Image (cartoon, rainbow, N blue to C red):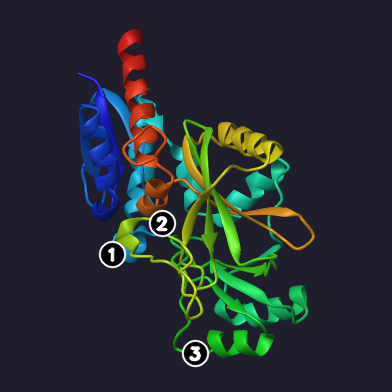
Amino acid sequence: MSRIHVLHENPAWLPPLAQALDRRGVPWTEWFLHEASFDLAAPPPEGVFYNRMSASSHTRDHRFSAELTACVLAWLTRWGRRVVNGSGALDLEISKVRQYALLERHGIATPRSVLVAGRDLIVSAAERYFAGRPVILKPNRGGKGLGVRLFLSAASLAAYVESDEYETPVDGVQLLQDYVRAPAPFITRAEFVGGRFLYAVEVDTSDGFELCPADACAVGDASCPVGMAPRHKFQIVAGIPEALRTRLERFLAVAGIDVAGIEFITDTAGQTLVYDVNTNTNYNPDAEARDGRTGTDRSGPGAIATYLAAEVARLREAA
């Protein structure tokens, strides 16, 4: 019997999707990919396989989960199984450099970035390519905004790199990136399910770059001056420009990505720059509740559950 198989490594992020699948009566199985063994000569079970591997898996003591998932996806592909967010999605999930290369190839602008491999080269690269301008230092393989830092001067960057606080990225690659100045401290995250736009959420960045929207990340509302109502950290907005939406949907189709959250920022000159593609996307339940989406197909988990159920039904019809 065909069913949905959810491949992941973080139980804390699973409940919203699990509840949405159960609510629809869809049979599903959890594949926890931390340690495992598979007979590569034997066919995998029937069904639809949904890859939710995260770039931040190493921060949960699952250092090799992404590599294990890549092997499992190759096995599934060899046997012709339907994989949602397959190998191409995983490849982009764990490398911002590869994300930017593919985005730029398809006419989607990204912030100017400089790859640096080697702690001792970071400061000289910043001085050479950014001439003392503010820069963001981020890991090539990160997740949840972890390890992303803004430096307003070369001196502050040097102090960090030379300190005990410096974090070596898991793949050894850092990015120095132009600090994009926006008219207001917000970024936009556009959510896509089945390769189609679902909704956009405006995220307040005034408190930093750790922007994971899931309940498990415990991100609350932003602070504000005394006497003013708190700003919501995550707020669903009407939509995104149609031309941008079309370009992003075409990009996802080429990349073989079914489910994603794509983050972008618009600078003071009006240029929109995409800086992150999240193929293991989470949703903020409070923002969805305020927008009347909870428990419906218009919510993130609901839309994914409905899409996966439709894929299973399609397989059954084709059998």
Q: Which residue is mark 3?
A: 163
Q: Earlier in the sequence, mark 1 or mark 3?
A: 1
Q: Is residue 155 above or below residue 313?
A: below
Q: Is residue 45 above or below residue 95?
A: above
Q: Is residue 169 above or below residue 57?
A: below
Residue found at the very far front of the displayed protein: 227
Instruction: Please indicate, yes or no, whether residue 186 appears anywhere in the rendered image.
Output: yes
Disc 3 secondary structure class: loop
Instruction: Please indicate, yes or no, whether residue 39 appears anywhere in the rendered image.
Output: no
The nearer-to-camera label among 2 and 3 is 2
The N terminus, quarter of image = top left
Q: CA distance from mark 1 to mark 3?
A: 24 Å
Disc 2 secondary structure class: loop
Q: Earlier in the sequence, mark 2 or mark 3?
A: 3
Q: Which residue is mark 2?
A: 213
Q: CA distance from mark 2 to mark 3?
A: 30 Å
Q: Earlier in the sequence, mark 1 or mark 2?
A: 1
Residue type, numbered disc 2: Pro
Q: Which mark is residue 61?
A: 1
Residue type, numbered disc 3: Ser
